Amino acid sequence: MDRRLVYELLKQVPKGRVTTYGALAKAARHPDSARAIGALMRSNPYAPTVPCHRVVYSDGRLGGYGGMKGVGKKARMLSKEGVKVKNGRIVDFEKHYFEVSLQTLSSSL
């Protein structure tokens, strides 16, 4: 999987919005690689410029940030951007969901 492509796709996600590990995998043309996306997020050397805190599970659960110990930090970062988090989940997940797209990325290059 192309790490640079995944990071460029993730940079599309604006403040106050989130995407999912699966959506990033699909946009990067590896639809069955959500776990690999998680590994890329854990090793992201460009955070917060590449906003890995905006990637969550498809059911709205936060997942980790710098490992599972960073869940509280991830929640605080999202809250500062206007995303309400309760009990480790995004409140009104559908409202905050952002679909990343390779087409949008290609047209902006």
Image (cartoon, helix red, strand yellow):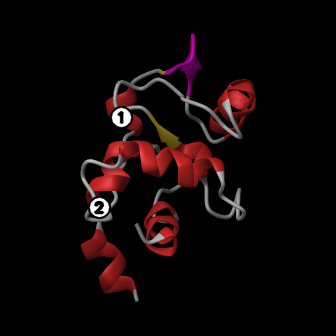
Considering the numbered disc 2 on the image, is that residue within a helix, a strand or a loop?
A: helix
Q: Give the residue drawn at x 71%, y 40%.
A: 66
Tell me: residue 26, above or below residue 35: below
- Disc 2 marks a residue whose amino acid type is Ala
Which residue extends farthest bottom? 109
Tell me: residue 109, above or below residue 97: below
Residue 50: horizontal and vertical position, in percent? Answer: 62, 62
Residue 104: horizontal and vertical position, in percent? Answer: 30, 73
Q: Quadrant of residue 27?
A: bottom left
Tell me the quadrant of the picture where the N terminus can be found: bottom left
User: Is residue 23 visible to the viewer in this orientation of the structure?
Assistant: yes
Residue 46, label in figure:
none
The residue tagged 2 is: 27
Category of crowding for the residue at label 2, using alpha-carbon neighbours closer than 10 angstroms: few (below 14), some (14–19), many (at least 20): some
The mark lying in front, picked from 1 and 2, is 2
Q: Give the residue drawn at x 56%, y 25%.
A: 84
Residue 95, label in figure:
1
**Residue span colored magenta:** 84-89
